């Protein structure tokens, strides 16, 4: 999947994410920290999400704590070179909700 960097998945999906307060200076998480991963509910912006203009960037994407997370493992149906359709779906649903 080719991510469109719209940020809608990072806002619209329930996800288990790295707790910002548990990230060590080297970008890893303490293995014994029971609060290292936290639940981010749908509709709430992920605290790791940063917008540069309209482009969404994950602030921990390149850190060790991102490896193995549900976000890293997230995928959609289709081939690797298909453009993401999930972000467009969430964008359309948000637009419909805002019109209601």
Image (cartoon, rainbow, N blue to C red):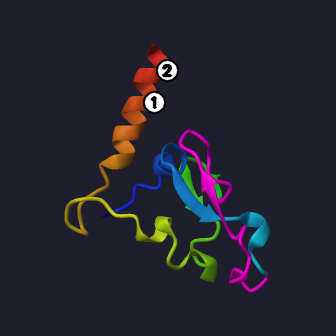
* Quadrant containing the C terminus in the rendered view: top left
Q: Where is residue 81 in the image (x, y as percent from the top left)?
A: 24, 67
Q: Where is residue 54 in the image (x, y as percent from the top left)?
A: 55, 47
Q: Residue 25 carries which label?
A: none
Element class at badge 1: helix
* Quadrant containing the N terminus in the rendered view: bottom left
Q: Give the range drawn in magenta.
A: 25-48
Q: Mark 2 points at which residue?
A: 98
- On screen, residue 93 versus residue 39, left or right, reads left
Q: Do the residues labelled 2 and 1 touch (CB within 8 Å)?
A: yes
- On screen, residue 55 versus residue 94, left or right, reads right
The part of the image, by quadrant, that contains residue 48 is bottom right
* Structural crowding at the residue carrying mark 2, measured as other residues with C-alpha within 10 Å and reported as few (<14), some (14–19) or many (≥20): few
User: Which residue is outermost to the left?
Assistant: 79
The part of the image, by quadrant, that contains residue 90 is top left
Q: Is residue 37 highlighted in magenta?
A: yes
Q: Which residue is drawn at 79% across and 66% down?
A: 21
Q: Mark 1 points at which residue?
A: 94
Alpha-carbon distance for marks 2 and 1? 6 Å
Q: Where is residue 12 in the image (x, y as percent from the top left)?
A: 49, 43
Q: Is residue 46 highlighted in magenta?
A: yes
Element class at badge 2: helix
The part of the image, by quadrant, that contains residue 60 is bottom right
Q: Residue at x 51, y 49 (%)?
A: 14
Q: Is residue 60 above or below residue 91?
A: below
- On screen, residue 87 versus residue 80, left or right, reads right
- On screen, residue 77 versus residue 4, left or right, reads left
* Structural crowding at the residue carrying mark 1, measured as other residues with C-alpha within 10 Å and reported as few (<14), some (14–19) or many (≥20): some
Total labels: the figure holds: 2
Q: Report the magenta stretch's main SS.
A: loop
């Amino acid at each position: 999947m080719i991510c469109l960097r719209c940020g809608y998945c990072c806002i619209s999906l329930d996800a288990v994410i790295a707790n910002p307060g548990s990230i060590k200076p080297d970008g890893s998480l303490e293995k014994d920290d029971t609060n290292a991963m936290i639940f981010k509910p749908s509709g709430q912006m992920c605290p790791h999400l940063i917008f540069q203009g309209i482009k969404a960037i994950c602030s921990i994407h390149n850190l060790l704590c991102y490896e193995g997370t549900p976000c890293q493992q997230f995928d959609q149906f289709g081939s690797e070179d298909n453009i993401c359709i999930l972000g467009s779906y969430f964008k359309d649903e948000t637009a419909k909700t805002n019109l209601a």
